[in-house]
Image (cartoon, coloured by chain):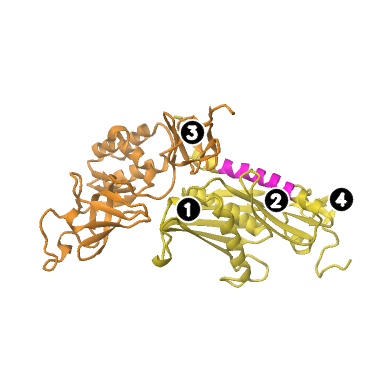
Chain colours: A yellow, B orange
Amino acid sequence: MSKKVGAPEALIVDGKRLDGRSPNEFRPINIEIGTLKRANGSAEFRFGNTYALAGVMGPRPFHPKALQDPQRSIVRVNYAMAPFSTKERSKPGKSRRSTEISKVINEALANVIFAEDYPRTGIDLFLVILQADASTRCAALNAASLALADAGVPIRDLVVSCSVGKVDGTLILDVAGLEDNFGDVDMAVATIANQDKIVLLQMDGIITKEEFMTLIDMAKKGCGQIYDMMKAKLYEKYVATPAEEGA
Amino acid sequence: MEQAMLLAKERQLVVPGEVLAKGFEWLPSAGCYRANNEIRAKQLGLVRIKERFIGVIPLAGVYVPRPGDGVIGVVNDIQPTFWIVDINSPYDSILQLGEAVGEYVDTTKTDISVYYDIGDVIYAKVMAVSRSKSVQLTMNDYRAKKLIGGRLMHITPSKVPRLIGREGSMIELIKNKTGCQIIVGQNGVVWLKGEKEALAAKAVLTIEAEAHTEGLTDRITKLLEEGV
């Protein structure tokens, strides 16, 4: 098998991955809610070295007025990678990739947002990747659903997302760094909470049906874990504030 | 059939998607939705149970006008026979000339800015809200007036009941301790005027930050007494 330029000898050694994780293990996950003061709601979500920051503006008046929907709110998602987020400077502004990711994230979130509660308005979601180390769309989607909850936008449930993949013939959870560049398969999955409802599924690479089904199961379990963390963090924002002694 | 069950307690903090009750004994109120036989929260907030109705009081969110609300607004624009008022909501509201002025006005001869000009702050009542949320205000209410001087503050609209307190106890407390005039709009806009504005403002911000906690009145009393 021919190796790509710059590829490491092996991506998995003695059952451990390059960063020392076992195949079924997440990178350290870090969540912060309410990081932006001027947005209606905001959150930061980190998978190891992948940092995603989300800000929600709205529901707010939608312009141009001719495009308002008299029955529902229009959700606009803007996913962008900061120029300094990658090793090579990435050109700021829209790209083919960012337009696509904005669209799939919007469609995933459209399943949970009660848009009909705010007719004629717009809800703007700004997602910025501050540091990219694979699984950026998953981190962005997690940050987005937390920011929506923080903004008080009515949603059915939190959307949670994680990536799974296949490197050196092993199925892994939470694809990172070189595994993304030199692995065989990379798949992003998002579910509604820990339910059996998939709202985003993207994959590249070649895989058998059995492996695919195993990966989906792994992703669902992973999403369940992330969901618990996200929920705990949302409670924490309000319980950890001062003077709970009276309660 | 599955047993009807109430899973949430009064004033419990819930996140969107959390199951509050099972079975058809209960009905979803504001902040909740029904998914098959479950009632789930759709906003982050505190549970409120009233008889068969389960609701969630959100801890964040924008103001959606409802008829009968008293709101504080800023006049944004003047048209020949109406004003457009910003009421701290995604929806602009309209104040018609007839709803604002008690006398006959010949619009061909008068510029209606003599009544309310751009930038004026008014306390008005929401008269009507259409299905597509076009909002009409009225000054035809004993509380409605133009607010002159003072300062405006913004708090989360869902926290207004906490700021007012039971039968106005909290707002009376601030008024008595600071000697300020205070008017609170249902839209989360607070108007303050008086010598100790800064202290009153501090109290308002504290209530905003700690609205979901208990024993708040005692802490506000302490804050206001220390500030004197």
> Which chain is indicated by disc 1?
A
Q: Amino acid at mark 1?
A: Ala
Residue of label 1? A115
Along the line of sight, the residue nearer the viewer: A241 or A33:
A33
Compared across the picture, whether B48 is left or right of B110 comes to: right
Residue A220 is one of the magenta-drawn residues:
yes
Res. B12 mark:
3
- Asked if labels 4 and 2 share a chain, the reply is yes
> Which chain is indicated by disc 2?
A
Q: Nearer the viewer, mark 3 or mark 2?
A: 3
Q: Main secondary structure of the magenta part?
A: helix
Compared across the picture, whether B105 is left or right of B32 comes to: left
Q: Residue at x 75, y 51 (%)?
A: A215
Would residue A199 be seen by someone viewing this image from the given angle?
A: yes
Residue of label 2? A27
Q: Position of residue B150 (x, y in %)?
A: 24, 52
Quote the CA–CA distance across marks 4 and 1: 50 Å
Q: Nearer the viewer, mark 1 or mark 3?
A: 1
Q: Position of residue B10 (x, y in %)?
A: 46, 30
Along the line of sight, the residue nearer the viewer: B103 or B186:
B103
Q: Earlier in the sequence, mark 4 or mark 1?
A: 4
